[in-house]
Image: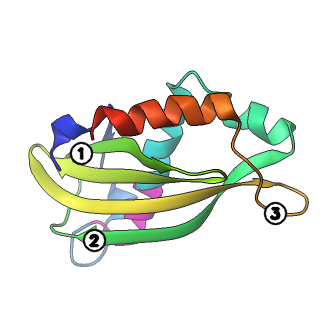
Amino acid sequence: MAKSDFSFTHPLRVRWSEIDQQAIVFNSHYLTYCDIGFTEYWRRSPLPSFVQMSGSGHEFFVKKAQLEYHQSAKFDDELDICVRCSRVGNSSMQITTEIYLQDELLINAELTYVYANTTTKKSTSIPSEWREFLNSEVKLKE
């Protein structure tokens, strides 16, 4: 993929607390970066906010996360977190995230989210109007 394949990009500057003794971003922080990207992607969508969603008794839970590391970010690097919905099912969706330093791909990730009841933790159907919007995102890049 390329940065242009994404409908949403969020900038992030690497903070001192995120680097390790090797002077690079500690690997677990990339999952946080993916979460930040997804949160901002969702915030800018026409879909209900996470606060509204949790008030309804349903939320998205991460079921699977897969990351591939290509290069490392360093302190004070200005990164672009690129996010798009790459698959939508009845009760789950896959979010593709790529993290770039300028045009250099550092990380690509696939996160599968399941929409579920917050009490029972059982999956439930993603509302059809949400699926419609998310499917329009998928089709943009087919």
Does 100 sit left or right of 9 as displayed?
Answer: left
Does 2 sit left or right of 32 as displayed?
Answer: left
Q: Residue at x 28, y 52 (%)?
A: 98
**Which residue appears farthest toward the bottom when viewing the image?**
21
Q: Amino acid at mark 3?
A: Lys
Q: Which mark is residue 79?
A: 1
Residue tagged by mark 2?
68
Does 85 sit left or right of 6 as displayed?
Answer: right
Mark positioned earlier in the residue sequence (1 or 3):
1
Residue 6 locus on image (x, y percent): 28, 37
Membership of 75 in magenta stretch: no
Q: Nearer the viewer, mark 2 or mark 3?
A: 3
Give the Cα separation between the discs numbered 1 and 3: 36 Å
Q: Amino acid at mark 1?
A: Leu
Residue 119 locus on image (x, y percent): 90, 58
Give the Cα separation between the discs numbered 1 and 2: 16 Å
Mark positioned earlier in the residue sequence (1 or 2):
2
**Which residue appears farthest toward the right when viewing the image?**
119
Give the Cα separation between the discs numbered 2 and 3: 29 Å
Q: Which mark is residue 122?
A: 3
The part of the chain drawn in magenta is 25-33
User: Pointer 3: residues within 10 angstroms few (<14), some, or many (20+)?
Assistant: few
Residue 82 in sight in this render? yes
| Nearer the observer, 69 or 21 | 69
